[in-house]
Each structure stands twice: as structure tokens, then as C-alpha cells.
Amino acid sequence: METEKFKILLVDDEKDILEFLGYNLKREGFIVTTARNGKDAIQLAKEEKPHLIILDVMMPQLDGIETCSQIRAIPDLSSTIIVFLTARGEDYSQIAGFDAGADDYITKPVKPKVLISRIKAMLRRYKEPEEKNEEIKFKNITINRERYLIIKDDKEISLPKKEFELLMLLASKPNKVFTREEIFSRVWGNDVIVGDRTIDVHVRKIREKIGLDSITTIKGVGYKIEL
């Protein structure tokens, strides 16, 4: 897919930031739509189906974390990349962002060239939604890749994108130990910088939401799903 075909939704309550970043993104050939609050962002995301959303954390009406969570619950946007752009650098806000389903986290102020470089790196890994219905089944759980859905005992469970991809990876080869480095590379990609606790947080969330005790921690190495 060529650069000019990528659609980006830029969300920030500061008009100057929208204009500055929007100008630089358009210069690179991206199709840019903007919103100044979370509610408008969700509506525009449904209408425009952007490939990537740049989302501020501190916004009126709905903050970025809640906005991200609601977008991640929309099946048509399961492949959309979400990156937080915010001045907040505390660990807790980054963890909250990843918990909500964000793919990356960039602290502002950021130079346009750096931002565009990061965006292009993320978009190189963009995948169109799968056309075929691919499922993985183990025990009483079915993982449906097409619908980004988990079915356990006939009950449907939705997971944020990265949690789903992590579970899908582990379940693709039961009893295989995936190293932390391999998980980072396969789920987040080598171009994305995430904290050391990111995988641990995602695994904990998967266990809590699905009640899954099959994910085993291999101390100092990584994780595996045992059947």
C-alpha cells in the first residue's frame, strides 16, 4: 500500500498541535482527519476506518484511554494501529494505554521527522483484516482470528488487539516456549519501543479476562501455553 493511501486520524484537544502535525503528515502524502475530543474521534473512526490513529491522553469528554478502549471494541477497526501522543511520561499512564489496546506510545514534544519515521515503521506492518475464517481451538476455548474474538464455553470475550495477538501467538504452537524477545518481535515489531513490563501486563490481563491458567511463565525466558 502506498503512503498516500494511508488514512490517519489525529486526535488532540490543542488546535495548534492538530494544525502543526496535520500539516506535516499531509506533506508526506497521508490522508489526515482530525478530532478535538474522544467522542468525535470514535465517530470519525467508525466513518473513516483509518489505518492509524494518533491519540492524546488528556482530552475533554472522553480521555484517550477510554477512547482507545471503545475503539478497540469495534470489530471493523480491529486492524487499526493506535499510538498515544502525550506529554505524560509516567509509567502508569503508559501501562494504562497498553492495557486499553494501544500499539505504541510517543512522548511530546516530538520532532515531525521523528514522528513520521515512527508512523511509517508502524504502517509497514499494517495488515488488512483476514478474509478467511481462521480458528484455533484448545480445551474449551476457540480463538477466531477473523472476528478478533475469544469464545469460551459458548461465551464471547473481546480482547484488545495486542492481548488477542499475544494469545493467538502462544496458542499457535502449544507447549512451545516463546522468548520475550520473540514475543516483542512478533506482536509489537522491532521498530516499536515498549517497556519491559508490557508483556507481563498483557499476560496478566489475558489470564484475568479469560480465566486461563494454561499460560505458564518460564522464569527469565518467556511464556508458553500448556495443553
Image (tube, rainbow, N blue to C red):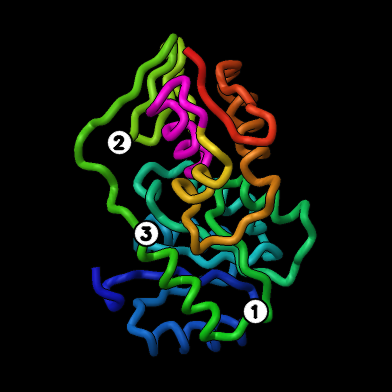
Residue 14 is marked as 1
Q: Looking at this view, is 96 or 66 the one in front?
A: 96
Rounded to the nearest whole Å, what is the CA distance between mark 3 and mark 1? 29 Å
Magenta span includes 87: no
Q: CA distance from mark 3 to mark 2?
A: 18 Å
Secondary structure, mark 3, is: loop
Res. 139 image quadrant:
top left
Disc number for residue 125:
3
Q: Is residue 176 magenta?
A: yes
- Give percent across and percent down for residue 207: 61, 24
Residue at 42% across, 32% down: 168
Q: Which mark, by number, is residue 146?
A: 2
Amino acid, disc 3: Arg
Dominant secondary structure (helix, strand or loop) of the stretch shown in magenta: helix
Q: Is residue 128 left or right of residue 195?
A: left
Residue 13 at x, y percent in the picture: 64, 73
